[in-house]
Image (tube, rainbow, N blue to C red):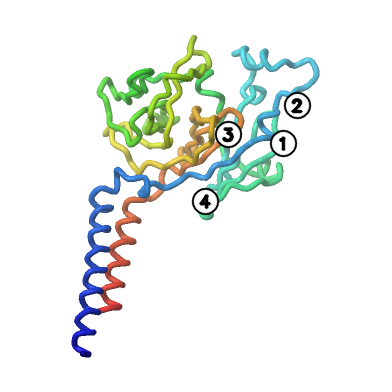
Amino acid sequence: MKETKNRKKMLILLGVAGLLGLVSFFFVRFGENTQINTMIAPLQNTDEWSQWKIRLPDGVWADGLLGNPDIPLEKRPGILLRTDASNNLLLKHTYGTVVYFYSPQTKVITEVSEDAWAKAAGKISYCSSHFYEKEYNPEVSSSQYPAYELTIRGAVIKTHGKFAINTLVSPSHTKAVILTADGPVNSGGWSVSFGLGGGEPTVLGRRYLEVLELGNAGFIQDPVGLLPTGEKYPSSLCWSNDENYALVYKPYENFSIIETNARPSQMLWKRFHSDFLFSFISLNF
């Protein structure tokens, strides 16, 4: 009787171990095509920034600031980025009063005082709406409706998201950040793209940020997923001056941050499954 119970227990343990092994094999083998394998970027709503027009000095009009190329960068409405001595990222709006702080250690975005911005010594990057000031690069670009393909030197490159929405080359021209989405394309509703002389359908589905190394036309880390934002889809891209961070945002309603030198999530997932299986088998056998 005791031998029968032990045999049943052994069969159950073997069955559980086999099931875990199959699950692990599935994610190691096919993980690059699954949602669960994607890291998620933190999202920050910027309600205060969206009210920037009410804080303009007397006699200054928003349309004049947006349409005049002679306006200095520090006076143009947009997001300013800089890093401090510990490589933390600070963000503020030209005409906003809230300063945000992002730590690569905690992966959390918090509000800080304006003193933190003043004390940071990193070079400032300026981020406007890249659909208003669209930056086309002959080397890397994303096509428009209906293809939405990523092309590098004329060759089509496969992205994690089926549709490549926007691209931006880094300041050193060694990397590019790509905004992609799963789709589908909502052909029933049209959204105006600033400065492009018309509109195009909205691309729906989960959005991702992907980082490309231009030298070998290869992706240097796993795609990072973006949290859903309803109708406030992020569309604009920006780099920090040191190229350690990329920003995707909806001017000026929300933003998400990714670290462009982050460790690939797929390797962490593989290691987790290997360690978990090893511990489980060691514990039970």
Cβ atoms at labels 3 and 2 below 8 Å apart: no
Determine which residue is flagged by label 1. Answer: 97
Cβ atoms at labels 2 and 1 below 8 Å apart: yes
Earlier sequence position, callout 3 versus callout 2: 2
In this picture, residue 156 sits left or right of residue 95: left
Determine which residue is flagged by label 4. Answer: 107
The amino acid pointed to by label 3 is Ile
Determine which residue is flagged by label 2. Answer: 55
Earlier sequence position, callout 3 versus callout 1: 1
Query: Measured along the vertical axis of the image, is residue 246 above or below residue 104?
Result: above
In this picture, residue 19 sits left or right of residue 171: left
Q: Residue at x 41, y 28 (%)?
A: 169
| Residue density around tag 1, few if under 14, some if 14–19, many if 20 or more, within 10 Å | few
Q: Which mark is residue 124?
A: 3
In this picture, residue 39 sits left or right of residue 67: left
Q: Secondary structure at mark 2?
A: helix
Q: Secondary structure at mark 4?
A: loop
Alpha carbon of mark 3 to alpha carbon of mark 4: how far?
Answer: 21 Å
The amino acid pointed to by label 4 is Lys
> x%, y% of residue 36?
37, 49
In this picture, residue 91 sits left or right of residue 142: right
